[in-house]
Amino acid sequence: MKTLIKNEEAQAGVGTLIIFIAMVLVAAVAAAVLIQTSGVMQSKSTSTTKEAAATIGENIVVESVDAISNSTNYLIGLNVTIKLAAGSSDVDLSKLILKVKTQNFNYSTTGAPAASTYRVYALRDRDLATGATSINQYTSSGSPSLKAGALVRLDVDVFSSGLTALTSKQSMPIALTPEKGATFNLPITLPAVGASTTVAIYP
């Protein structure tokens, strides 16, 4: 009859194996968390980079501003001529917000500009970017774009928008805010405006 030999080394080995497996599991969980976090950070950094590039790249330049008055010397309309700054990407004019003093104006596709709206008039349009059928026409497109080399005019009806009291020597700041680009601010003080005339007020 053989004598049983007591040996506890196997038990010590099992404990080491359990600790090793636990360390592997912890490392796997930590690696998964790091991979997920890095993916989220990469996605956010890509989005931030695109937004920053759009903010820098979409810049509008105001070429001129003309004021239209009525028979009682009140301001009834504005013609704002704009183009893209050098190196800028295309700007969606249907998303452009024009602000005169405290009043916001949005793009209109049909009819004459009504209250709180403006129309886009093609003066020099590369590839008919505004959606007009030819130059010197109003656009009929639902989403016209301003491209490099194009020159367009925004016709604004301020008479129907609660700004009829604007007369000579009054402050009338103008701001153009594209969908993603930087806002173009233009501080203007109305000069002496005659009755039923169109006067260049900028530059």
Image (cartoon, helix red, strand yellow):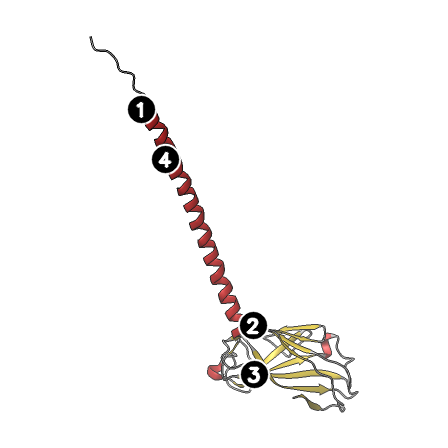
**Element marked by disc 1:** helix
Please say whether residue 104 is visible from this viewpoint. Answer: yes
Disc 2 marks a residue whose amino acid type is Gly
For label 4, the residue is: 20
Q: Which of marks 4 and 1 is nearer the N terminus?
A: 1
How many angstroms separate mark 1 from mark 3 (CA)? 88 Å
On the image, the x and y values in percent for residue 23 come to 39, 38
Determine whether label 2 and label 3 are within 8 Å by CB. no
What residue do we see at 77% from left, 82% from top?
Answer: 170
How many angstroms separate mark 2 from mark 4 (CA)? 55 Å
Instruction: Say which quadrant the C terminus sits in.
Output: bottom right
On the image, the x and y values in percent for residue 104 come to 67, 72
What residue do we see at 25% from left, 13% from top?
Answer: 4
Q: Earlier in the sequence, mark 4 or mark 3?
A: 4
Please say whether residue 142 is visible from this viewpoint. Answer: no
Disc 3 marks a residue whose amino acid type is Val
- Between label 1 and label 3, give the one nearer the viewer: 1
Disc 4 marks a residue whose amino acid type is Phe
On the image, the x and y values in percent for residue 96 come to 59, 73
For label 2, the residue is: 181
Q: Earlier in the sequence, mark 1 or mark 3?
A: 1
**Element marked by disc 4:** helix
The label shown at residue 202 is none
